Image (cartoon, rainbow, N blue to C red):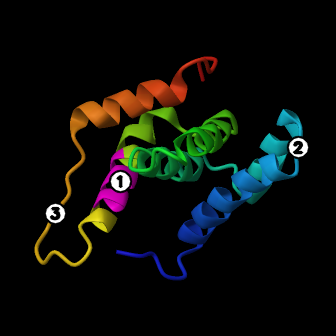
Amino acid sequence: MGRGSDPDGIAVARLQGAVSYTYDRKMDHADAVAHLRAISERPDLLAEAAGIIAGASTQSICHRPTEMRNARRLVEAGADRVLLPRWIRQGIENAGRGKLWGRAGAVFVAPQELVDETVTELLEGLPEG
């Protein structure tokens, strides 16, 4: 279910768009993180944006490298790492439901193994946070 005009939902959507912008504009790391934090410094919203991007990327091989890069930058901006599995699951399930479009009653449940693998891949090489 969508969040409508919920300010948190709007902030998450802005973060998801802004993270691509930071790469398109070739911002250095510190400026990019500052740009994302200017939208929201809340670790829960940064985690939501990062997790949904990373989870959805599991269903799109051609976009996965770019999307994982974007999700990592959101983690580096201060995402709450404890919340990442929840939002990665949501991203996987959102993308999976899109593949089931038009199939009445179809339900897509993210396998725990895929969630765990995505968390590991997302955090690989990042300093402890």
Q: Quadrant of residue 103?
A: bottom left
> What residue is shown at x 69% (from left), y 49% (from top)?
41
Label 1 amino acid?
Answer: Gln
Residue lying farthest to the bottom in this orientation: 5
In 3D space, how far apart are the residues under numbered discs 1 and 3 (Cα atoms)? Answer: 13 Å
Residue 56 at what x, y percent from top left? 43, 52
Q: In the visual, does 16 lie left or right of 59?
A: right
User: Residue at horizontal 52%, vertical 47%?
Assistant: 62
The residue type indicated by label 2 comes to Met
Sequence order check, earlier mark of 1 and 3:
1
Q: Position of residue 53 (x, y in %)?
A: 51, 50
Q: Quadrant of the N terminus?
A: bottom left
Q: Which residue is mark 3?
A: 107
Residue numbers of the magenta segment: 89-96
Residue at left offset 58%, top offset 61% = 12
Residue named by callout 1: 90
